[in-house]
Amino acid sequence: MKQQAAAVRKNQIIPLEITGMTAEGNGVGHFCGLAVFVPQTAVGDRLDARVVKVQKSYAYGIIEKLHTPSPERIAVDCADFRKCGGCVFRHIRYEAECRIKQQIVSDAFQRLGHITPRQILPILGAESPDRYRNKAQYPCGADPETGRLRFGLFAARSHRLIPVAECVLQPRVFGEIVRFCEAALADSKVITPYDEESGTGVMRHLYLRRGYHSGEIMVCFVTAACTGAAESALRALGTALMRAFPDIRSVMLNVNPKRTNVILGEETRCLCGSETVGDTLCGIPLRLSPQSFYQVNTAQAERLYAEAKRLGDPKPDELLLDLYCGAGAIGLSMADAAGKVLGVEVVPQAVENARENAERAGIGNAEFFCGDAGEIAAKFAAEGRRPDLIVLDPPRKGCDAVTLDACVQMAPQRIVMISCNPATAARDAAYLCGRGYTADTLRAVDMFPRTAHTECVVLLTNRAIES
C-alpha cells in the first residue's frame, strides 16, 4: 500500500477512467492500484486529473482536462454549481442519478450491514428534480468587497459564503425574498452580519419555509442577539415583506447567541402575522413552527409515507408507535388504518404542533408524548405496552441502542424504519436482525434530487411471529 501511495504525489496529473461513484457523489477511478476520488465526474468519463490530496489507500483529484465525456453527462443549468456545496449530480441525467442512489442504498445494506433483504424494490424517483425544497436556510455574511450584508450558501466542505442569486432547488420566490432582504439591510447600522470567528454581529441566517400545497410562507430571522433597536428594525422589515409578498403569513425572530453550527436557538418570538404556517401532507392539515421537523420535499414525502404505510400495513385493531414523530405527519397519515397511534418527539414545539394537527384533522386516536425517543420507548416497554407496529424515523445519526433494545423488548410484529442515511439505517437494521427480526423489504426514495442524499424505507418482521 505504501508503494501505491508513493507512486502518486500531490499536483501530479494522472489519466483516469471513472468506473464508479461514492455515496458522497464523487467519481472513482484507479491509478497504480490506488482509488482516486474526483468530484463532478460521471461513470464513463476519461480524463486527466490533478491530484490534490494523497492518503495511504486513496487520493483526491480534480478535473484537469476531460478527454471523453460520459454519455450520462448533460449541460449544467446552474451558474453556481461548481462553487456551491449543494448539488453534486447536476451534471448528469436524472435517470443516472437514480441508478447511483439505488446502488448506494443496496450497497449500504449488503456491504455495511451484511443484510440481504428478501426484496429490494426499485427507487422512487422524483417527478421533478428541481424547485422541490419547501425550506431554505441562508447564512449571512459581509460582502468581501463592499462589506455589505449578504445572504448565500456555503461552499462545499467549508463555511465560505457563496452569494447565490438563484438556487434551482428552491422556489423562485425564495430568491426574490433574499434579494428584498439584502436590499433593505444593505446599509443598516443596526442589523450587521454575524462573524463566526469573532462572534460579533447580529444576523446569522435567513430561514424560509413554504407550504407546498398552501403556498404560505414563513420568514424567520436568526440572530446572535437582538436589542430593542434591532428587533424594531426587523419588525419593520417583516411588515414590508408581508406587503411585498402576499403569501408571507408569518415573520419570526429566533435568537441563537451560542458559538455553534446549530442554526436555531431556543428563543423564538413572532414579529408579524401568525406564529405558524399551514400545509397539508397526505391529506392531513398541518401547522408548522420554525422548529417543526418537516420533510423538505413534500411531494416525495407523500410518496415515502404512502410506501411506509403500505409496508407497515396498520390494521384497525392494532397499536402503532411512531418514534421521532416530529409534527406527527407519519403517524397521522396512518391513523385512519390503525386502532391507536402513539407519537414520541423530543422537540416541545413539534409535539405541540402534532397535537394541534391531530385536533385540526379530527383525528381522535392519536396521542403524543414529549421526550427522548429511547427513554420513552424504554418506559413503554417497562410498562408492558405492546405495539403491533413501530415506525422509526430517526435523525442522520440513527437510533441509539436504548431505543432499539426497547423496540426489541416490546416485540412488535413489524418495524418500519425510514432514514435519510442509508449507512446508519443498515447499521440499525443489522442490530435488529441480530435480535429476532428479518429485513423483509427495502426501497430507496429520492427525497433530495441533485444532492448526494437519499432516503430509504425498510420493513423488518418479527421472526418469532413468522414461525
Image: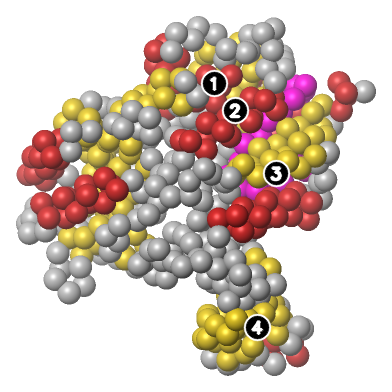
Q: Which mark is residue 16?
A: 4
Q: Marks 3 and 4, how far apart in space?
A: 31 Å
Would you call the spot at circle 4 few (<14 residues within 10 Å), some (14-19), or many (20 or more)? many
First to last magenta residue range: 409-431
Q: Amino acid at mark 4?
A: Leu
Tag 2 near tag 1, CB within 8 Å: yes
Q: Which mark is residue 306?
A: 2
Q: Amino acid at mark 2?
A: Ala
User: Which label's residue is closer to the chain start, 4 or 1?
Assistant: 4
Would you call the spot at circle 3 few (<14 residues within 10 Å), some (14-19), or many (20 or more)? few
Q: Quadrant of the C terminus?
A: top right
Q: Where residue 260 appears, x then y in whole percent?
A: 37, 53
Q: Marks 2 and 3, how far apart in space?
A: 15 Å
Q: Quadrant of residue 278?
A: top left
Mark yes or no: residue 333 visible. yes
Q: Which residue is mark 3?
A: 122
* Residue at x 79% of width, y 34% of height: 440
Q: Which mark is residue 333?
A: 1
Q: Where residue 152 appears, x then y in whole percent?
A: 29, 59
